[in-house]
Image: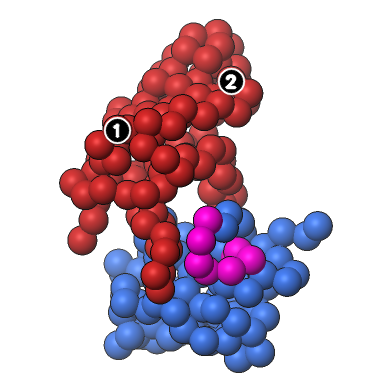
Chain colours: A blue, B red
């Protein structure tokens, strides 16, 4: 079974530029998560989708971050404009559903460096 | 918001030694999970704990869910070089509308052959 796919793996941009990350979850997984992992810390949830609807985006900085999952499968996370403090690894995860005890499977992440 | 305190921050051990790390929270969780993350990869689930007092093993790994529901520990017995990585605890309160994971800051494990 293929795992969670993410691209690109690495991205370097200047501050105030825009950037987008792509995630393709495990086939059949209804729930998709985006996490931000700053160096030396654990992942922090940014947004959670159930199919193509948002379940929780309470920790998403909505003035600059946006995410969509239009067809309920793959998803994109965008930052516009980027700040220095956005430098982090952005992890995508998926699970079969969002309620109950469902294991989240993580992708390899996209490492973003903002200069 | 909820925060998890994970200790130690890092450990340098000799191959064959046992390892112990723990995680404490200011609030209760009804699920504790332990993940391992290797460089360039996402976290991988090692053990999940669902009941206060529960002790669960996965090979050389053993984890316990604290009675107070505010803490958990992970032990690794007879460490080997491939145990190297960052170990994260995570708490979750499932049920209702959300089941968000709250992660600790991780324990970085180095094993000397």
Q: Is residue A10 above or below residue B85?
A: below
- What's the residue at 53%, 15% (across, down)? B77
- The chain holding disc 2 is B
| Relative horizontal placement of residue B48, taking residue A43 as reference (left or right) | right
Report if residue A36 is visible in the image: no
For the residue carrying disc 2, how many other residues have a C-alpha within 10 Å: few (<14), some (14-19), or many (20+)? few
Report if residue B87 is visible in the image: yes
Which quadrant would residue B104 be assigned to in this image?
top left
| Relative horizontal placement of residue B71, taking residue B48 as reference (left or right) | left
Range drawn in magenta: A94-101
- What's the residue at 64%, 66% (across, down)? A96
Question: What SS does tag 2 mark?
Answer: loop
Residue B95 coordinates in the image, percent (x, y): 42, 64
**Given the current orientation, which residue lies at the most extreme bottom position?**
A70
Which of the marked residues, 1 or 2, is nearer the chain's N terminus?
Answer: 2
Nearest to the eye among marks 1 and 2: give it: 1
Which quadrant would residue A114 be assigned to in this image?
bottom left
Report if residue A16 lies within the magenta region: no
Q: Is residue A63 above or below residue B69?
A: below
| Relative horizontal placement of residue A3, taking residue A60 as reference (left or right) | right
> What's the mark number on residue B60?
2
Q: Are marks 1 and 2 in contact (CB under 8 Å)?
A: no
Residue under circle 1? B67
Residue A97 coordinates in the image, percent (x, y): 58, 69
């Amino acid at each position: 079974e293929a795992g969670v796919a993410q691209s690109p793996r690495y991205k370097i941009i200047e501050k105030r530029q825009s950037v987008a990350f792509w995630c393709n979850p495990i086939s059949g997984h209804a729930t998709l998560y985006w996490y931000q992992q700053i160096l030396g810390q654990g992942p922090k949830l940014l947004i959670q989708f159930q199919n193509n609807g948002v379940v929780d985006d309470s920790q998403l900085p909505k003035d600059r971050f946006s995410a969509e999952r239009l067809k309920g499968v793959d998803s994109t996370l965008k930052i516009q404009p980027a700040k220095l403090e956005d430098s982090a690894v952005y992890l995508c995860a998926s699970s079969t559903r969002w309620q109950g005890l469902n294991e989240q499977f993580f992708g390899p992440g996209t490492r973003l460096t903002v200069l | 918001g909820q925060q998890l305190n994970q200790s130690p921050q890092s450990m340098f051990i000799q191959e064959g030694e046992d390892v112990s790390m723990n995680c404490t929270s200011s609030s209760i969780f009804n699920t504790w999970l332990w993940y391992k993350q290797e460089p360039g990869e996402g976290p991988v689930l090692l053990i999940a704990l669902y009941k206060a007092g529960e002790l669960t093993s996965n090979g050389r790994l053993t984890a316990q869910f604290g009675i107070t529901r505010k803490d958990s520990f992970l032990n690794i017995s007879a460490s080997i070089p491939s145990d190297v990585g960052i170990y994260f605890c995570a708490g979750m309160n499932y049920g209702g509308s959300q089941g968000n994971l709250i992660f600790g800051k991780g324990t970085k494990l180095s094993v000397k052959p």
